[in-house]
Image (cartoon, rainbow, N blue to C red):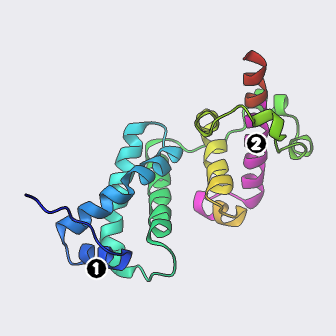
């Protein structure tokens, strides 16, 4: 009868991984892989790339665990590694461009207009599930989607986003505003069709 490997706490799990304990490494992977794949998928264009990013992220995690100081939860620390890895893979595999399609920009209005009415009324989104919203976010053009995810979901500041993507803070703000406006448009259009 095989013994199931369950560790008592996070520190024990980390110590086991640092020592190269395969069962501890498997436990870490099993415990976090589902969530980390979801995080990587938000930044990748397809599931295959997301899986690659997650695998690379776990390799980095195992290699860097000795440097984890415990100032945050392990999951938070790993999330940052996964986001950085997924964005790096995206930039490597895709020509990263900020999205400024003139037709969409004209449809959304100029920046002054984009800044207004960015938030949905609760009545506009009551019928949508979390999965519906994530699907609509994934339909956004890459530049919009990546900035939106970094800001709205992962909580980075425009300064941090600018540094991460090599853009200006103003560009980050513009991409976010346009992403929100386009997302709102998609939600409203979807509700009209239903």
Rendered image: mark on residue 37 = none
Q: Percent from the top left, x then y, of residue 70?
A: 45, 81
Position of the N terminus, as image quadrant, is bottom left
Residue name at image x 28 percent, y 62 percent: 27
Q: Percent from the top left, x then y, of residue 65?
A: 34, 75
The total of numbered circles placed on residues is 2
Residue projecting furthest to the left:
1
Instruction: Decide which of 67, 17 is in the foreground and name it.
Output: 17
Q: Please report the bounds of the magenta region as a residue range.
A: 163-185
Residue name at image x 65 percent, y 66 percent: 160
Residue at label 2? 180
- Helix, strand or loop status at disc 1: helix
Does the magenta-highlighted stretch encompass residue 174?
yes
Residue at label 1? 15
Does the magenta-highlighted stretch encompass residue 101?
no
In this rendering, the answer to whether 89 lies above or below 141 is below
Residue name at image x 44 percent, y 57 percent: 85
Give the quarter of the image for residue 142. top right
Measured in 3D between alpha carbons, the distance from the residue under mark 1 to the one under mark 2, in whole angstroms, is 42 Å
In this rendering, the answer to whether 70 lies above or below 105 is below
């Amino acid at each position: 009868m095989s013994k199931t490997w369950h560790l008592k706490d996070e520190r024990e799990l980390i110590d086991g991984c640092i020592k190269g304990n395969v069962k501890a490494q498997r436990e870490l992977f099993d415990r976090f892989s589902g969530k980390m794949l979801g995080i990587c998928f938000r930044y990748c264009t397809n599931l295959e790339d997301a899986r690659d990013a997650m695998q690379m992220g776990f390799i980095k995690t195992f290699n860097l665990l000795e440097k984890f100081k415990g100032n945050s939860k392990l999951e938070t620390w790993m999330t940052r590694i996964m986001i950085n890895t997924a964005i790096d893979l995206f930039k490597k595999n895709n020509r990263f461009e900020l999205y400024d399609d003139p037709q969409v920009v004209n449809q959304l209005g100029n920046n002054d207009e984009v800044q207004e009415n960015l938030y949905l009324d609760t009545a506009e989104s009551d019928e949508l599930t979390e999965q519906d919203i994530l699907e609509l976010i994934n339909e956004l053009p890459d530049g919009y989607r990546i900035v939106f995810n970094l800001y709205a979901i992962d909580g980075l500041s425009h300064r941090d986003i600018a540094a991460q993507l090599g853009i200006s803070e103003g560009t980050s703000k513009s991409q976010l505003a346009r992403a929100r406006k386009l997302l709102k448009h998609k939600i409203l259009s979807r509700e009209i069709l239903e």
